[in-house]
Amino acid sequence: MREPLIRLLSGIGVALAAATFAAAQGNAETDGVSDITVVPPDPTLIGQTTEWRICNETSYVLRTASAFTRGAGMTAKGWNEILPGGCIALTTPVMGPRFLFAESIDAYQGGVREWKGTTPLCVDDVADFAAPATQDCRLANRTERDYFAVRPGEPVTTLVEPLDYGRERAVVAAQQRLLRDAGYAVSRVDGVAGRRTSRLLRTFRDDNGLAATVTGEPLMRALVDAAKRAQATVGLEICNQSSAPVWAAVATREDDAWRSRGWWRTAPNSCVEPLDISLIGTDAHFFALQESDGDTDLWLRTVATTPAQFCIAESRFDAPGNDMCVDRGYTVASFRPLPTEEGRARVRLTDADFAERRPGGLRR
């Protein structure tokens, strides 16, 4: 679903993220690709350092973690924030392995996007972490991310998207994306600074008491803050008020096509947020399974005379369409509709919502 690649253009490494992204647990099925040729180090370069620039030509504000030889050994370190169109510079050994992981900050609807590969190393939520490559992430109370390999000695690594905006258009695309996530009527994120984008930026400045001269980083920070505030008005929250853990799945209509995804686990007396987009116009539905002491889970009880049916699977899944589920290796389940007149909804599930038993034990 998210497939960062590495390609080389005129000696400059570029990390490419796929166009389709997913959010939260249940949607992180990613295969990274690393096209790296390992070259034996030149003995004359051992101990020397160079500047490694990491540039952001995506439409997202990114934070990055890097891993290379620091002091006595390989260490993963982060986070470094990079605005669209910007770069950071790190001092690294001239030769030796380098690895990079990047993700969007949590200001965007639809979840965090990742630029990653196949090398598992630790990250931490703190702003300035350092984790030895030999560290067990779980024992250190850290999480694991898959870093991608970077060609040793390359001077610049540029993070891009399939549209490949370039440096200047990335800034405009980022403004468009944040405007849209803040609730402004942006029809397309294309990086083109047209009259509509200029008009929306003027409206945004007026709405937030900003002078017309506010541009660059201050404008980007204001857009980020507005997008974060807007998140409180969108999304789906499923709260488990039953006596056992519940596993949730959702279905939405995107570009006139159905898509069902799962699973999100929530313990009793807790909540989970499987959707962080506006529900307006999505025709959103949900389904849930309750863990049981028996051989099978309890299924969400059907409430509609003609229920809407979508595809589910035993493990984490992301199923396009809602037809021919069995032929495609899925199981059919009856989902409940969600209210979509407003951008946000909350569902509370109790033991009374689960009554039907089906074979298969689906919910892992």
Image (tube, grey):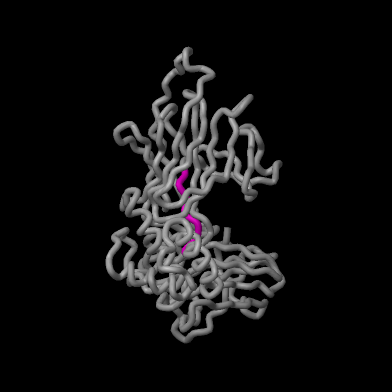
- The magenta segment: 110-116
What secondary structure prevails in the magenta region? loop
Q: Give the residue displayed 34% in from the left and 38% down from the top.
A: 7
Of the pair 15 and 364, the residue shown nearer to us? 15
Query: Residue 256, percent across and down?
Result: 33, 72
Quarter of the image with the C terminus is bottom right
Of the pair 321 and 36, the residue shown nearer to us? 36
Q: Residue 89, relative to residue 228: is it above or below?
A: above
Whether residue 171 appears in magenta in the rendering, the answer is no
Image side of residue 357 versus residue 13, left or right: right
Q: Give the residue displayed 49% in from the left and 73% down from the top.
A: 209
Of the pair 294 and 182, the residue shown nearer to us? 182
Q: Residue 81, relative to residue 226: is it above or below?
A: above
Q: Quadrant of residue 300?
A: bottom right
Query: Residue 41, percent across and down?
Result: 46, 18
Q: Quadrant of residue 200?
A: bottom left
Q: Give the residue displayed 31% in from the left and 53% down from the top.
A: 163
Query: Residue 190, percent across and down?
Result: 31, 60
Of the pair 124 and 223, the residue shown nearer to us? 223
